[in-house]
Amino acid sequence: MSKIAINCDLGECLTPNPDHKIMPLIDMANIACGGHAGDDESMKSSIALAQKNKVKIGIHPSYLDKKNFGRLSHQLSHEALYCIIKDQIAHFLQLCHENNVKLEYIKPHGALYHDMMQHDSVIQCICRVIKDCQPNLLLIVQAGINSEKFREIEKKEGIQFMYEVFADRGYNNKKMISRDNKGAVLTDTKRIILQYEQFLNEQSFQIDTICFHSDNLASIEALKQLKKQ
């Protein structure tokens, strides 16, 4: 099996906080930056923890909606969305600069991620922010769906994408099952590991990174078991 980078959403101020257990088990940390979760203290702590464990640092921006954990879509003008995303990235970049670490990539969170995959205007807005803030940032997008379209966007915008799948989310063919439906989240450690291994052997579409969720206890256990292999 080939190695594919493991990423995880961290800095989300969960109780209890799993970040210290997870960080040594992953390659990439998607750090919440205040939209759906997080504040300056959690961001600084997550940056330091990633640096200590030699984990690549990414930013995990969201709609400004802590009440719903960023999982509800917001209908915003292009400029309003641009400002929301840019403010989160600019502030996080400053924290990275203060701690002498490199920001490697951006992975939108929740509803913003799904809107990016469905609406050209949203991904174009995110690409505009990247070009204005730090043009060499990678952008994580979902693998296996609308691949040709996203290749065209990648080339047109001049931004490199990373293609992602989820070890602990249910799929119907290549599409994730909506969180509103049964089977959307895998809660059995063995099933998560099996799906992870299936993705390692996937040949029909490009996969650059595999996500495990920090708020899923079965995913944390899966990461621990995979680390021992």
Image: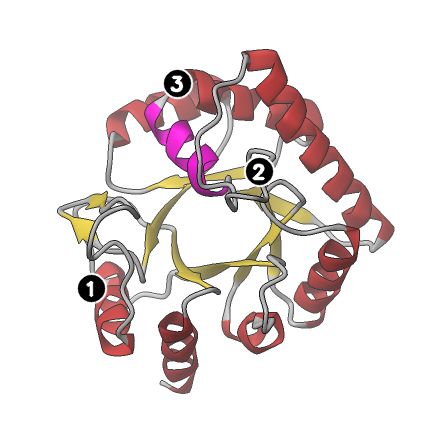
Is the Cβ of the residue at disc 1 closer than 8 Å to that at disc 2? Answer: no
Assess disc 2: are there few (<14), some (14-19) or many (≥20) residues with their C-alpha within 10 Å of its C-alpha. Answer: some
Query: Which residue sits at x=37%, y=48%?
Result: 164
Q: Which residue is mark 1?
A: 198
The local secondary structure at tag 3 comes to: helix
Query: Which residue sits at x=38%, y=61%?
Result: 4
Instruction: Give the number of the mark in front: 1 or 2.
Output: 2
Residue 80 counted in the magenta span: no
Question: Along the line of sight, which residue is nearer the eye, 140 or 178?
Answer: 178
Which of disc 3 and disc 1 is earlier in sequence? 3
Assess disc 1: are there few (<14), some (14-19) or many (≥20) residues with their C-alpha within 10 Å of its C-alpha. Answer: few
Q: Amino acid at mark 2?
A: Asp
Which percent across, then down, holds residue 187? 29, 69
Which percent across, then down, holds residue 106? 56, 41
Instruction: Give the number of the mark in front: 3 or 2.
Output: 2
| Quarter of the figure with residue 10 | bottom right
Count of labels in the image? 3
Q: Which residue is mark 3?
A: 120
Q: Which residue is mark 2?
A: 65
| Residue furthest bottom in the image | 228
**Most common SS among magenta residues:** helix
Query: Which residue sits at x=27%, y=62%?
Result: 200
Residue 114 counted in the magenta span: yes
Which quarter of the rendered picture does the N terminus lie within? bottom left
Which of disc 2 and disc 3 is earlier in sequence? 2
The local secondary structure at tag 2 comes to: loop
| Residue furthest left in the image | 173
Give the magenta-colored segment's residue range: 109-118
Q: Amino acid at mark 1?
A: Gln
